[in-house]
Image: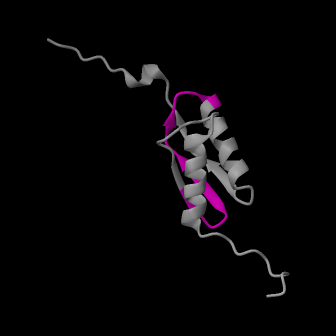
């Protein structure tokens, strides 16, 4: 090895786990339930959060951790009102 060879790309599962751990532990996000899938040079993020600010922060953290990947932030924003249902009793 001459030291001029390009660095070997980490396996997708390691990149995905690194991004998942960063999203779970970064103080801007602290989200445990975000799905991370690596396909080639793309990282797909999925799950649900309560605000657009949180969704954007998740995308930002992923981009910082994996700058050589394209981030596809598919995280949905659900408001607290979306989770309440009213049951009508007769």
Residue depicted at 55% across the width and 42% down the height: 24
Residues shaded magenta: 37-53
> What colour scheme does the image use?
one colour
Q: Position of residue 15 (x, y in %)?
A: 61, 61
Q: Position of residue 84 (x, y in %)?
A: 36, 20
Of residues 87 and 34, the one nearer the viewer is 34
Residue 51, placed above or below residue 35: above
Using residue 81 as the reference point, say whether residue 68 is left or right of it. Answer: right
Residue 37, placed above or below residue 11: above
- Residue 39 forms part of the magenta stretch: yes
Using residue 1 as the reference point, say whether residue 87 is left or right of it. Answer: left
Q: Position of residue 11 (x, y in %)?
A: 59, 70
Where is the C terminus found, in terms of image quarters?
top left
Extreme-bottom residue of the structure: 1
Of residues 6 and 43, the one nearer the viewer is 6
Residue depicted at 61% across the width and 56% down the height: 43
Extreme-top residue of the structure: 90
Say how many tags the image has: 0
Question: Quadrant of residue 87 in the image?
Answer: top left
- Residue 46 forms part of the magenta stretch: yes
Question: Quadrant of residue 75 in the image?
Answer: top right
Q: Position of residue 20 (x, y in %)?
A: 55, 50
Extreme-left residue of the structure: 90
Where is the N terminus found, in terms of image quarters?
bottom right
């Amino acid at each position: 090895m001459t030291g001029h060879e390009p660095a070997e790309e980490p396996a997708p599962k390691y990149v995905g786990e690194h991004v998942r751990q960063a999203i779970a532990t970064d103080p801007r996000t602290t989200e445990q339930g975000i799905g991370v899938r690596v396909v080639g040079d793309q990282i797909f993020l999925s799950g649900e959060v309560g605000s657009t600010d949180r969704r954007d922060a998740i995308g930002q953290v992923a981009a910082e951790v994996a700058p050589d990947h394209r981030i596809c932030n598919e995280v949905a924003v659900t408001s607290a009102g979306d989770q309440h249902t009213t049951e009508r009793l007769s």
